[in-house]
Image: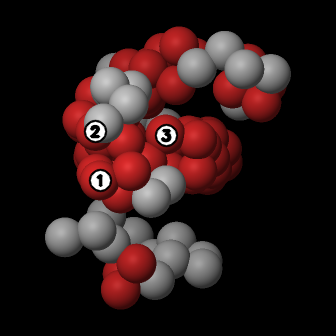
Amino acid sequence: MYCLEHGVGEAAESLVTNAEGMGQLSEGDSKIAAKAIRDVMEYIEVSHLRGGVAAHMAKEDKYTVWKALQARAGRALLKVHKPGAAPIPGFDDTDLDL
């Protein structure tokens, strides 16, 4: 996340790829990984997706690539957070982009 905060956008894909490859995690590690993935998803939304398709497609700024990466992050979040466990505090399923 330090890299993302300092303008290295390529770190987002690295974080998502690493999260996708994680195996069984302890409860503590799972919370840390889930927080990092949520932060990546927020970074992508704020930095690359805000305004929707219409605001980005004319600029050729890889909107669809970022949207796909955000979807991968969402799947990784479900994997590391163990969907059968209690919900993530503060998670509101009405915020999902369906």
Residue plotted at (39% across, 70% down): 85
Query: Residues under labels 1 and 3: Cα distance?
Result: 12 Å
State the colouring used for the structure image: secondary structure
- Residue 82 position in % (x across, y down): 36, 57
Contact between marks 1 and 2 (CB within 8 A): the answer is yes
SS of the residue at dot 2?
helix
Query: Residues under labels 2 and 3: Cα distance?
Result: 11 Å
Residue type marked 1: Ala
Q: Of label 2 and label 3, which has the lower sequence position? A: 3
**Residue hosting label 3:** 48
SS of the residue at dot 1?
helix
Task: Please state if 56 lies on the left or on the right of 48 as rendered.
Answer: left
Residue type marked 2: Met
Residue type marked 3: His
Q: Residues within 10 Å of mark 2 (few under 14, many from 20)?
A: few
Residue plotted at (38% across, 20% down): 17
The quarter of the picture where residue 61 lies is top left
Q: Is the residue 8 above or below the residue 48 in the image?
A: above
**Residue hosting label 1:** 54
**Residue hosting label 2:** 57
Residue 37 visible in the shown view: no
Residue plotted at (28% across, 51% down): 53
Q: Is the residue 23 above or below the residue 25 in the image?
A: above
- Residue 7 position in % (x across, y down): 72, 20
